[in-house]
Image: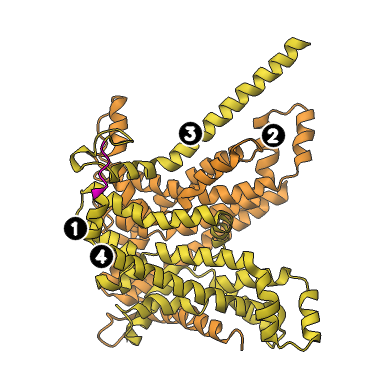
Chain colours: A orange, B yellow
Amino acid sequence: MFIAPNLLAVAVFMLFPLGFSLYMAFQKWNLFNPATFVGWANFHRLFTGDPLFAIALRNTAVFTVGTVVPTLAISLIVAATLNRKIKGIGIFRTVLFLPLAVSAVVMAVVWRFVFDTNNGLLNIMLGWIGIGPVPWLVDPTWAMVSLCLVSIWQSVPFATVILLAAMQGVPEDLYEAAKIDGAGEIRRFFAITLPLIRSASSFVVVVSIIKSFQAFDLVYVLTGGHGGPESATYVFGIMLFQNAFAFTDVGYASALAWVMFAILLVITILQLRFSRRNSLEQ
Amino acid sequence: MSSLTERVIKFNVLRAIALYTALTVMAWCALFPILWAVSGSLKKERDVTAPVLLPPHPQWSNYGEVFALMPFWRMFLNTVFYAGCVTTGQVFFCSLAGYAFARLPFKGRDVLFLAYLGTLMVPLTVTVIPQFILMRTFGWTDTPWSMIVPGLFGSAFGTYLMRQFFRTLPNELEEAAILDGCSPWQVYWRVLLPHTKPAVMVLAVLTWVNVWNDFLWPLLMIQRDNISPLTLGLVHLQGQYVSRWPVLMAASMLILLPLVIIYAVAQRAFIRGIALSGFGGR
């Protein structure tokens, strides 16, 4: 009885949608006319008939790699710097984690201001060192760079929280022993810290991939909702939104959702395999 | 001898300076877009390009203009209402179900719990379209119901979180109560729930932040301004006044402020919650 309301909610809003979405992936339905069964036609169209699918796949891949790799590198450095008992470290932690509270929408609006070609802070600062105005959100290549920058800014605090927690679990005496053996700070980081927090870093990578693979809010607000300029930021999140809710091609959008899900599953499994094999070799 | 101590001290001082410099640079990177936005929100429109952080004549009237251009208080109250309802519902129903999963033996419990865990893996993209159609079928699109009901009766993630916490509580707590003839409900409500405060805090903060910052769902559901939450209002405002940066920044900061306050007050629960949210979204 205690779980009945909860179970009902999970069934109605999670389990039913899951099944229904799979069912719709094989239908043609525009929300108004009755749905008709079309077999694999939606998937066929995705892979062979829609040039936008390849564009979205490419952009999503670039965006995901361009977010996850720098995020991991930066957050490792930040977490290692924060992982010390010195005066005032609490204040620095508070400040560095603050972006966690900022919603993607607010962030995107604020960053549009920072990126503004004529009035933006970035171009003003680049101007000081003699670099001409960069067309951040206007030029297709730069638009993707901008998107990755904001996304990195957004995901570093989260990754840092996880990595810092893992680093604090590394036994102190390992460092002491290495110190006596004459290992420097950087050596100790690579020889002790990195191997021991491997599972945390792998978790960070998986979660960041899942998040950036499905990014929507940020892209929608930052580059205007259509994946522009010139479909340079047309990612899967935007493609799904357009097909489902602008063109109301619900069956096609559901097929896309399942393809995304499948790609994510494969990546996650590969990643888990990979990190497990690595930790076995140790 | 003394020169060696001197050198060690000198080295340590240098190290501390390097460390604090690095931390300051990092903190600056995390904060500068927000500070720049605050600064922009206080500038005159023709001065937004001026590269000064502290505007000489702060234009508080920009904030007044936000209230004139969008029904801010109305949207603020909407958001508080949605977040309040969903948070209360989540905490109540998730802790109830979490208690049952942790402490009450019943048939099929573990299988059911595994199914719950499974739904955590399903990405939002797969479920969002059927959820949209569900709301349409109920006739709830563009009503407050669509913002409240899907989250009200609990979620798999919240249940998982609460169950894990209930399991850490010692059995002795309830044994005495059961001997005294308490019903399972009394055990839950009077004996165990008061002990779960840390987990409840995490779940509450996390739910509140999610509802507050959510954009995709309100974008799909809500058209009318008078039931719209703040994120949607901000995006509409941006659509209408594309480059009136001071007003846009003022609105962004007003939306951000309540979360920064929550972050400052409940920092521990906040960070723990965000870290845990990596294990499964809403």
Q: Is residue A112 above or below residue A250?
A: above
Q: Secondary structure at mark 2?
A: helix
- In the rendered image, residues at marks 2 and 1 fall on the same chain: no
Q: Is residue B155 left or right of residue B174?
A: left
Q: Quadrant of residue A6?
A: bottom right
Position of the N terminus of chain B, as image quadrant, is top right
Residue kind at label 2, given as amino acid type: Arg
Residue A244 showing in the rendered view: no
User: Which mark, by number, is residue B25?
Assistant: 3
User: Which mark, by number, is residue B71?
Assistant: 4
Percent position of residue A191, x then y = 69, 37
Q: Secondary structure at mark 4?
A: loop
| Pointers 3 and 4 in contact (C-beta within 8 Å) | no
Q: Cα distance, mark 4 to mark 1?
A: 14 Å
User: Considering only order in the chain, which callout, 4 or 3, is on the residue closer to the N terminus?
Assistant: 3
- The one nearer the camera, B124 or B158, is B158
The crowding category of the residue bearing disc 3, from other C-alpha atoms within 10 Å (few below 14, some 14 to 19, many at least 20), is: few
- The one nearer the camera, B213 or A260, is B213
Give the chain of mark 2: A
Residue B42 showing in the rendered view: yes
* Magenta highlight range: B57-61
User: Which mark, by number, is residue A188?
Assistant: 2
